[in-house]
Image (cartoon, rainbow, N blue to C red):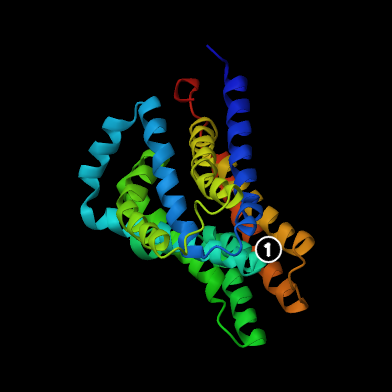
Amino acid sequence: MPGPVDHRSRGWLSALSAYLAWGLFPIYFKALTGIPALEVLAHRVVWSVVLLVPVVLVLRRGPTVWAALRAWGRLAALASASLIAVNWLVYIWAVQAGRVVEASLGYFVNPLVSVLLGVVFLGERLQRVQAMAVALAGAGVLWLVVHLGVIPWLPLSLAFSFGLYGLVRKRAAMDPVGGLLAETALLVPAALIFLAWRGVTGAGAFGHGAGPSLLLAAAGPITTVPLVLFADGVRRLPLSTVGLLQYLTPTLQFLLGVLVYREVFTQTHAVAFGCIWLALALYTWDSLRRASERPPAPLSEL
């Protein structure tokens, strides 16, 4: 039996691999530029289910998926599926439209949005440092609104759609892999109808060249593999560690947008990002401090 060091080392490797993969997502979706975002989303849904079914069977999570679905409820399942579809669609469109930096902002803001949603919907108490962090992030968003003259709908839609998705999933208490299978399965009928219509009209990209077809089919493993790695990492690492590692994803996306894709990053953006980064630093420090005050989990729970 592996010791706690090996256990956590594997957790680090799994979690880091997942966040690195998610951080490099813009490279994949950029390669699909020219294919409508809705079509890319439909393929992502279909190919994810194709790969998730055998994964769930191999991991022997089938019974837990069905049990959780029965407890979840039809409305909650549809809400969760709709929210993840909106999040995926907006993100794909953002990358293809050359707005990777804005998309990264959404995922920087997301942890603080989740804190706010917990206060509003779950009755969680907002601690002083957390309140300061949320206020700082709000100041950064307000700065963008005032100086750019528009509401930053793209990062806010990503942050709130994913935050609300997390809220629904928290109430469902379903494991990540099985939950994604349930959600994408609900979306499959609409995705197949849309792809069939695209194919009949001759507008679909799949089947018109090996390159685009392989890239679209790759949406399955690109979606599923990081999620399986993430689930393994969460199981083996303290949540405080996972919470800290999550910032790797938007950081990589931000660097890709600025350094590789040469997107606009003005002084106005720098001030807004500075406020949000400071807010995240406060939030992370407070989370780590609170985690250090809790008694360590016994080895039997690792």
- Residue 285 in the image: above or below residue 104: above
* Label 1 CA crowd tier, 10 Å (few <14, some 14–19, many 20+): some
Secondary element at tag 1: helix
Horizontal relation, residue 183 to residue 288: left or right: left
Residue 100 in view, yes or no: yes
Residue at horizontal 54 percent and vertical 72 percent from the top: 154
Query: Could you tell me residue 207's position as x and y percent?
Result: 50, 51
Considering depth in this image, is 38 or 225 the residue closer to the camera? Answer: 38
* Rendering coords of residue 242 (x, y %): 57, 42
Q: Is residue 41 above or below residue 180?
A: below
**47 sits to left or right of 288:** left
The answer to whether residue 118 of the structure is visible from this angle is: no
Instruction: Name the spot of residue 65 as percent of width and height, x first.
Output: 29, 37
Residue at point 35%, 26% (across, down): 60
Q: Nearer the viewer, residue 66 or 206?
A: 206
Q: Is residue 26 left or right of residue 186?
A: right
* Quarter of the image where one finds residue 49: top left
Residue behind mark 1: 278
Amino acid type of the residue tagged 1 in the rendering:
Leu
Residue furthest to the top: 1
Give the residue drawn at x 59%, y 48%: 22
- Tell me what residue is drawn at x 58 percent, y 33 percent: 14
